[in-house]
Image: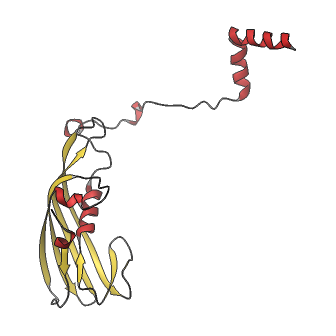
Amino acid sequence: MASLKLFDIDIHNLSLKEYDYQFDIDNSFFALFEDSIVEKGSLTAKVNMSLHPGVIEMDFAIQGSVVIICDRSLEEYDQEINTNDRLLFKFGDENTEISEEIISITRDTHRINVAQYIYEFITIAIPFVKRHPRFQQEEDNDDEVKLIYQSSTAPAEDEEDKDSEDPRWALLKNLKNNLN
């Protein structure tokens, strides 16, 4: 069983140079994240970390595949993942996310856990429309969009006209008029 501690990168007392790390991602990794959209996969995450005065630069190269469910057939299939992403950790007064790519950390931070970042990079690399490989060649054709549901927004007058045309409504109206 994987542990989040396996994804800690020690940054305390390191020299200003480059360091390389490799993390193997499997099913136990995805089990660490509650309500994960991915449960199965086999990937390798390579992290190149460059230390500069006041800034730590991390380049993530993640390759492998995850098992996801096709939106059309609801069958599981292997989705290839190949993504390259970068994060900058800037030393500041507090631990906060400045932007999607820049994170502020305090000077007394001794380690950075990259598990959440790796998870996010993997999930972002999954296509929005998930199609089994046998459906990959099909193109979305906007000309052939089918209307599945349409709500009626007809004015009340139109409904009265329809009611008067139906003989059942005419009988009900006669009964109503006779009661008065």
Give coordinates of residue 108: x percent, y percent. 29, 90
Residue at x-position 22% and y-position 58% = 30
Q: Is residue 97 left or right of residue 121?
A: right
| Whether residue 138 is situated above or below residue 85 in the rendered picture | above
Residue 21: quarter of image = bottom left
Residue at x-position 23% and y-position 72% = 114
Residue 102: quarter of image = bottom left
Residue 22: quarter of image = bottom left
| Whether residue 104 is situated above or below residue 177 in the rendered picture | below
Q: Is residue 24 left or right of residue 30?
A: left
Give coordinates of residue 25: x percent, y percent. 15, 61
Give coordinates of residue 129: x percent, y percent. 32, 45
Give coordinates of residue 180: x percent, y percent. 87, 14
The mark tally for this picture is 0
Residue at x-position 23% and y-position 58% = 31
| Whether residue 28 is situated above or below residue 172 in the rendered picture | below
Quadrant that contains the N terminus: bottom left
| Colour style of the rendered protein structure | secondary structure
Residue at x-position 19% and y-position 76% = 8
Frontmost residue, 142 versus 104: 104
Q: Is residue 127 left or right of residue 168?
A: left
